[in-house]
Image (tube, rainbow, N blue to C red):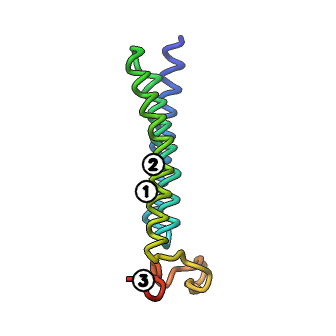
């Protein structure tokens, strides 16, 4: 009976993790500038990968596999936000500024704002 519960729970976690990763990929394709794309990728991919790792741990038979998956989980939780922040900070220091409301133009009827350009650089940045 417990095997059935663990199978159903792990399949649900696999599905939810896959959906989060898909949502992050969709955000990378749809969002207008670098910073919103980084946010979509960083948040959803971290959580999606963590859910998949948890699902794999529920399916594991031996303790050593569960311990290894736990260490991978901790590594991802600690390093993924840091690397996302480092990439965004490097882009900002390099002169890439986020889009503001002034950078957006009204879109066709029934749609939201559409970016004029993907991002803008400050004067003097190369």
Q: Position of residue 27 (x, y in %)?
A: 48, 61
Secondary element at image label 3? loop
Q: Residue at x 47, y 67 (%)?
A: 30
Dot 1: few (<14), some (14–19), or many (≥20) neighbours within 10 Å? some
Secondary element at image label 1? helix
**Label 2, label 3: how many angstroms apart (C-alpha)?**
34 Å
Question: Residue 90, relative to residue 99: is it above or below?
Answer: above
Kindly check if marks 1 and 3 are in contact, taking CB atoms under 8 A apart as contact: no
Kindly check if marks 1 and 2 are in contact, taking CB atoms under 8 A apart as contact: yes
Q: Position of residue 83 (x, y in %)?
A: 45, 53
**Which residue occupies the foreground of this view, 89 or 12?**
89
Dot 3: few (<14), some (14–19), or many (≥20) neighbours within 10 Å? few
Question: Residue 90, relative to residue 102: is it above or below?
Answer: above
Q: Earlier in the sequence, mark 1 or mark 3?
A: 1
Eye-nearest disc, 2 or 3: 3
**Which residue occupies the foreground of this view, 106 or 83?**
83
Q: Position of residue 65 (x, y in %)?
A: 38, 21
Eye-nearest disc, 1 or 3: 3
Find residue 125 and name its label.
3
Residue hosting label 2: 21
**Which residue occupies the foreground of this view, 78 or 35?**
78
**Label 1, label 3: how many angstroms apart (C-alpha)?**
29 Å
Secondary element at image label 2? helix
Dot 2: few (<14), some (14–19), or many (≥20) neighbours within 10 Å? many
Q: Residue at x 38, y 17 (%)?
A: 64
Quadrant where the C terminus is found in the figure = bottom left
Q: Residue at x 59, y 79 (%)?
A: 100
Question: Residue 32, relative to residue 86: is it above or below?
Answer: below
Residue hosting label 1: 25
């Amino acid at each position: 009976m417990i095997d059935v519960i663990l199978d159903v729970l792990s399949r649900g976690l696999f599905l939810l993790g896959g959906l989060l990763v898909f949502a992050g990929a969709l955000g990378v394709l749809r969002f207008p500038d670098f910073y919103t794309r980084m946010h979509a990728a960083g948040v959803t991919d971290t959580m999606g990968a963590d859910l998949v790792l948890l699902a794999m741990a529920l399916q594991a038979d031996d303790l050593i596999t569960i311990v290894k998956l736990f260490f991978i989980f901790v590594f991802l939780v600690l390093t993924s936000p840091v690397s996302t922040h480092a990439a965004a900070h490097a882009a900002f220091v390099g002169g890439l500024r986020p889009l503001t409301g002034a950078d957006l133009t009204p879109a066709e009827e029934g749609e939201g704002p559409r970016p004029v350009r993907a991002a803008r650089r400050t004067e003097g940045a190369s």
